[in-house]
Structure formats: structure tokens, C-alpha cells
Image: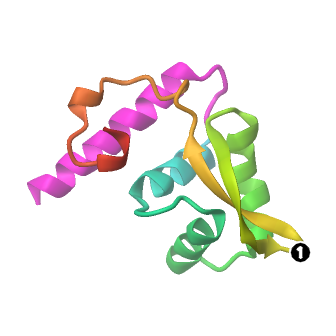
Amino acid sequence: MLKTVATELEKEYILSSIAKSTPHKLTIEDHQTLLYLLSMNGLLSVKDFASTYNHLHDKKRIQVIYESMINPLIQKGILEVERTTHKNMFGSYPNEILRFNPHVMEYDRDKIKSLKRYR
């Protein structure tokens, strides 16, 4: 139970550092999206994010999720598209592999022990 609490505190620490490092005000939806992305294992693809989101909430089309949740964070410079895949998200728009912009994630990496991706 303590490990779970420590992991959640690390996520909040990273979210706090992002909020302090970006000139943009984060909305509640931005915060929720970032929290889900920090919780994901493996590749941070838009399709995987949409699957996770739809598992926990009322179902939304992937295009709606991308346009309302992911793209605003890309526009704010918090997320970057690392690369695209050969599979499409919607229409002919390729699935994107995302990463956090390292220039916006300025935090003490020694304080992060559970989130291996961010150490």
C-alpha cells in the first residue's frame, strides 16, 4: 500500500513541476490526461491512451479524445510527438507515439524512484 502511495505522490510531484515550468495554465482535463499518461506502461500511444480512457469512462471516439485531450497538450508544448506508427487512429491520420517534453519536466530525478520511465 505504501508503494502505491509513493507512486501517486511521484506523479503529483511531476505534475506540479510541469505546471510550474509551463507558461500555460493547465485545465482540469489537462491534469487528468497527464495523470493517465504518467500511469501508462509501455509506449505512450494515442490509441493506447484512448483505450485506457474508454475503459474508465463513457466511451468517446478516438478523434474526440485526441482533439480535446491530447492535442491541447501538444499545442502547449507539454507533449511531443516522438514518431508515428503504420496504423491509423482515425481516417488516414496515423497513430502517434508521444513523449513528455523534457524542457517542461524540470524536476529532481533523485526524488523519483517508482516511475522508472521518468528517472
Extent of the magenta region:
1-26
110 to 89, vertically: above or below: above
Specify whether residue 22 is painted magenta.
Answer: yes
Image quarter where the C terminus lies is top left
Which residue sits at x=25%, y=49%? 7
1 to 77, vertically: above or below: below
Relative placement, left or right, of 11 versus 53 is left
Pick whichever, 30 or 106, lies toward us.
106
Which residue sits at x=57%, y=66%? 49
What residue occupies the far right of the structure in this picture?
92
Quadrant in the rendering for residue 26: top right
- Magenta region's main secondary structure? helix
Specify whether residue 84 is painted magenta.
Answer: no
Relative placement, left or right, of 109 versus 103 is left
Q: Secondary structure at mark 1?
A: loop
Pick whichever, 85 or 102, lies toward us.
85
Find disc 1 in the rendering and name its residue. 91
Which residue sits at x=22%, y=30%? 111
Relative placement, left or right, of 6 versus 10 is left
Pick whichever, 98 or 72, lies toward us.
98
59 to 49, vertically: above or below: below
Spot occupied by residue 91 in the image (x, y as percentages of width and height): 89, 75
Image quarter where the N terminus lies is bottom left
What residue occupies the far front of the structure in this picture?
86
Q: Look at label 1 and name its amino acid.
A: Gly
Spot occupied by residue 76 in the image (x, y as percentages of width and height): 71, 33
